[in-house]
Amino acid sequence: MIRGLVVVSLIACGAPAPSAPMHNRAAAPPASDLVRRAERALSDSLASDLRRPTLAPPYDPSGVRARFTEACRGGDAPSCWKAISIDGGDSAALELARQNCLAHDLMSCRGLPAFTADDAPGAAGRSRACQDSAIFGTCDPRALRRECAAGFAVSCQWLAAYAPRVADWDAIKARIAPLARAGCKAGIAAECRALVLEDSDDDTLLALRQLCTLARDRCAVLGRRYLRTAERARARNAFERACQYEAKPEASCLELGMAYLSGQLSEPVTGRGQALIDWACASSGLLRRIDPGCKRALLPAASP
């Protein structure tokens, strides 16, 4: 990993210059200060707020994302990957990560999300043709093989999935977890999603924690995983984060509310379970139609 990578001008290499002027380094705080501010903003944003989703506006990740983009502009390459991974992504951080990638920083290439930067290394693994099994025939497995050999975990995963009969399949498969583990720890959401699909329970837990923290994604999956191991306090925290902070939290809130009403989890405040169910079922016509939890929980006889 390259920390503090200076985002370079690529004019000399024939690539277009950034459309916006570079950050004024002389006037800016040191990159380390910017990174600390970004990490503190992320940590602060993880605090539980039981007013959500019923009594407070939906969570807006833009403030935390902007902090990481600021650190990215200040020259910290990993902050670019995190700004990209936070829900909604950031176009400025994406362009800076692309420039770092073209300047031969492999981790920045790996930090680029799907369907972007078809002019940068790792493009095959990010392409719609390779990521969509319905149109895989237009994806070049030779390109995936080259990218896998270069260190792209996602490309290794697609190659293993779509070429199961190649002689070196075991070697290809064995590359995925170590690569994805390192990328996930560094804050690359795409590699966390690759890691979730691997066989190690420890890797799955790492990936789910990272995705829940950065992208506010898979939090309910993390909660179910904790329930299976009877870690009820952690399960409740993960489900609450899903309910409070996901972009579309109705299904997660309904699941959590039912867990509270059934006694599977302990309510943080009395009435939390029923309030979540009432909100989720009122907010989503689809849930009212297809989820038996709504009908069951809204019966007059239902009680915590």
Image: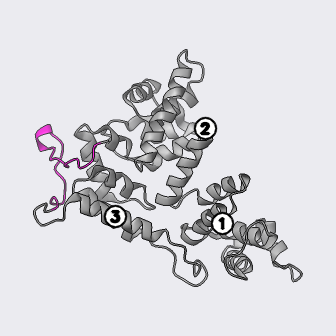
Quadrant of the frame with the N terminus: top left
Q: Find the magenta span and give its range.
A: 2-23
Q: Does the magenta stretch include residue 18?
A: yes
Quadrant of the frame with the C terminus: bottom right
SS at mark 2 in the image: loop
Q: x%, y% of residue 254?
A: 71, 70
Q: Is residue 29 magenta?
A: no
Disc 2: which residue: 200
**Residue drawn at (37%, 46%), measured in percent from left and top?**
112
- Earlier residue among tags 3 and 1: 3
Classed neighbour count for the residue bearing mark 2: other residues with Cα under 10 Å, few (<14), some (14–19), many (≥20): few
SS at mark 3 in the image: helix
Check whether the beta carbons of the residues at disc 2 and disc 1 lie within 8 A of each other.
Answer: no
Disc 1: which residue: 236
Most common secondary structure along the magenta stretch = loop
Q: Nearer the viewer, residue 196 or 94?
A: 196
Q: Nearer the viewer, residue 19 or 35?
A: 35
- Earlier residue among tags 2 and 1: 2
Q: Residue 174 carries which label?
A: none
Q: Is residue 246 above or below residue 168?
A: below
- Earlier residue among tags 3 and 2: 3
Name the amino acid, label 3: Ala
SS at mark 1 in the image: helix
Disc 3: which residue: 38
Q: Which colour scheme is used?
A: one colour
Q: Which of 8 and 127 is in front in this view?
A: 8
Q: x%, y% of residue 157?
A: 52, 33
Left or right of residue 213, residue 37 in this image? left
Name the amino acid, label 2: Ser
Q: x%, y% of residue 244?
A: 57, 72
**Residue drawn at (58%, 82%), measured in percent from left and top?**
51
